[in-house]
Amino acid sequence: MAEGKKAKKLEKIRIMGELERGLDDVDKILATGKTDIELDFSACTFISVDGLEWLEEFLLRADSLKSAVTFVNVQTPVYKVFKVAHIDSLMRACGSPSQDAQGLVC
Amino acid sequence: MTVSSEQELMLTQRANHLVRQARLAAAVFTQYSQEKVDKIVRAMTAAAIENAGKLALMAHQETRMGVTEDKILKNLVASEFLYHQIKDKRSVGITREFPDLNMVEVAEPMGVIFALAPVTNPTSTVIFKSICCAKTRNTVIFSAHLMAAESSNYAAKIMYEAALAAGAPKGFITWVDKSSRLRRTSELLMSHPEVDLIFATGGTQMVKAAYSSGKPALGVGPGNTPVYVHKSANVLSAAMDIIISKTFDNGTECPSEQTLVIDREVSEQLLNEFKRLGCHLCTQEEVEKVSDLIVDSRTGGINYKLVGQPANLIADQAGLNITTPIKMLLCPLNGELRHHKLAIEKLMPVLGYVVVDSVNEGINKALDINYAGGTGHTAGIFCEDDDVIERFSDAINAGRIIVNSPASIGGLGGVYNHLNTTLSFGCGTGGGNITTDNVGIKNLINFKRVPRRRNYVISFQTTKNIYINPGSIDHLKSLKCQSAFIITSRSASRRGHLAQVTERLPQDCHVDVFTDMGPEPDFATIQRVVASMRHSKPDTVIALGGGSVLDAAKIVRLFYDYPELKISEIAVNFLDFHHRMIEFPKDMKTQLVAIPTTSGTGSEVTPFAVLKDGHRKISLIDECLLPDVAIIDAHLTRSLPPDITGDTAFDALTHALEALVSTFSSDYTDGLALEALRLIFESLPETLKNPNNVLYRHKLHNAATLAGMAIGNASVGVNHALAHAFGARFDIAHGRANAAFLLSTIEYNAQIPSKFVSIPCYPLWVADRKYARAAQFIGLTVEPIEGEGEEARGLRLVHKLRQAVYDLAKLANQPLSVSELGIPVETYMAAIPELTEVAFSDMSIRTNPRYTLAPEVAQLFASAYAPRERP
């Protein structure tokens, strides 16, 4: 967290089963602008294209609200999805290195 | 912003959008199981079959090429036949197992595939590639030919919707919409960084563009199929197959026949049959007219407006007066075939032919066509003679050589043969491609090889019959032999050993003797002995003497039994015994009895033989060198002078120490090495004190043989490499040469290596622990120090071992440094580069527990010169 920034409350949310689409409850928590969010993927078994797109958009919204979002306990199959998707924001949320310069251009 | 740059931006955004969809779908697809994938493939196949007719009609209406009924067949081949071939194949997780190799292959999708679909097969290609991509968990963006984009894209839509309904990821199939900017969009996609592979089936220009994009590309080359009709062929059947093939979709299939090469013996029958079945045989004048029509005079290529058009239409346009329906036009290609205008790919029912007078001429003419723009693609042969088929296949450069079947449908695979079903024909390097495969699912998977560590089998071998204990020489009395050839040295003869042997051999055994075997003989001496043996024709060789005699006898027997062998060929170095290139004979014909008269080399039980070759030593290693019988009789060593007793004992000591830490050591060799060490430390001092004490001579003799068994299976190490080079260069007895380096090499090997040895049978560097174990085994101890770790204690034990070796060497009057051997320092130092080179290439070094680098070899030589203090 940047120096001087006021600490927000950290909300820990566990994603259960298949992430097939956006999660309204989580969107609402973010919309308050009062919390940082930790998404726990330990119980996430599958992620769809819609799920991916929601995560990417969620991170964009969090960024504009200056809320920090981190992904924790990402299981290998889902982590591989993030890797192959070449979406840098997802990797950053995992605390992983960015993709190389040849990453997603679109 | 200008109109063109606005347009370019719009196209780029469109390309980005397509790729993004495909990229996300590719990511999601990585999670799919085999079952889920197979369900999708099944649904897509069903949809393709259901829509085969509709799509064929649409393709024909849009392109005005080919035959709707044949396009239906193509759509079915691309779905039903493909499905049949791939339905049970694994494309997720472990795809293949190789139990014998301890290896598996695991599938990794390639990712985003940009696929081209040609105008000639606009729907079948899309069906085929979509199903292949689903099976391999890749996503695909289609770019159709502008003239076929509506039908191609509709096929893509049908496949996508079926896949989506069956659970495929959103965006798994996408396509470039038909527009005047389709080609530019395709170019942007070809070079898009998020596209992983270009799967190009299409015109030559598009395939070239794909290859030029800098991306991995599966392309296809152009075809120009020669088909040879040999005189042995079933002519009537051949005629029908050729008509089926060449008229299939009006000749749009690129594997289809372009020029027939017909044996004269069957040409009349074949041409008559074509005529009977409704083909038109053109006159020379008609050939000219057809050529003028279908060949573009500017480029020499095909007139694309006639691709896939019916024969009658072509005949009409060419001005041929044909009023009846015909299936195809047959054009004799007279004159120089290589320069004939029609000796090209003709994607229409126009077929060239030539008549030949021999198989040789037939294959050569086929090669002319094959190399005239169709290299690597397809060829065909109608023939019942397997030899001719083999000759044809050997000569023709084609990814598929179709035998006794229609080349076009045969090339598609799965209908007439067991080729992989495809709509994409790899042409190998001849066609500028990476593969000659019928491209399919296996070309769309990144196969990850997962090799488990090899099970490295080490065998244990030694001399089969070993007679031990003092007096065991009496075994010779019962030796089965009619004619013995004794190889020995003058000293053995002088010491009475020769007489002891000859007295004990059976009465009826003829005996010849060679007594001039000196120390470290060369190959000329070996040849001399073999020549002597040729006269007496012995069935048994008896080697009586020290290591040099025994080694020499092994080589003598080898060349006596197998005179055709060449020393230069069997002395080739090797890295790994299991993989070495040379082969020794499996069975020896002549019995070899080894009777050592020194307690050192252990040669009586090893598969080694060393030979001097100028300033270097050659090592021969093979099981066939093992003697059949060894007699370990300590009485024969009683008269051994103290200096030779010490020299040879230090050779045995070095064997035991090096075998113990060797990378090829095992529990079997460790036991032998440790016991040999213990016996040497126990018996050498006693033997030196009382040379006639047979009990200690016996122990020392056994120690040498045990150490021999150890090195016979575990080999030696860097000390021997140094000693071989040094001994050969300065003519130093082997045992003494070993002794001079022993303290250095124990210290060197006990240190954590600067480089580890890469060999599967040595998974852990344990040389320091093994030396420590040796120290304990011979009764050395260190006082415990509180808090001291095992490693530090081990190093103190190694230090103790070096002290013990030093003390034993002093007792046995062994040199512990090179300077003690009277070699001037300047001479020695000047020789180090040469010594290093020789030692570094010595096979002994290969089993050293520390990967010995050349500078380290030089350092070991250099540090061995100065006189040593007790460690």
Image (cartoon, grey):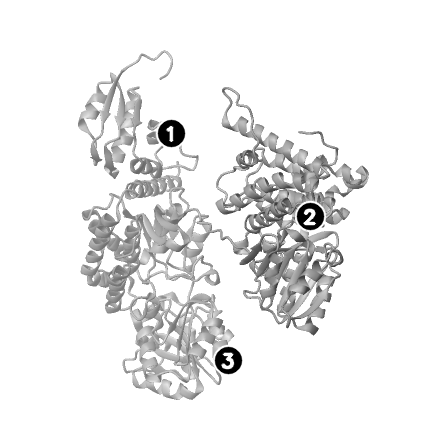
Direction from residue B233 to residue B605 in the image, left or right: right
Residue at coordinates 59% horizontally, 37% vertically from top-left? B749
Q: Nearer the viewer, residue B343 or B768?
A: B768
Above or below B386: residue B93: above
Distance in Å between CA atoms under marks 3 and 1: 66 Å
The residue that disc 1 covers is A96
Mark 2 vs mark 1: in front = 2
Label 1 marks a residue whose chain is: A
* Viewer-closest of B487 and B321: B487
Q: Quadrant of the C terminus of chain B?
A: top right
Which label was assigned to residue B691?
none
* In-front residue for pair B454/B58: B454
- Mark 2 and mark 3 lie on one chain; the one further toward the N terminus is 3
Asked if disc 2 and disc 3 are in contact, CB closer than 8 Å, the reply is no
Residue at mark 3: chain: B
Tell me, yes or no, whether dots 3 and 1 are on the same chain. Answer: no
Callout 2 secondary element: helix
Inspect this view and state whether residue B309 appears: no
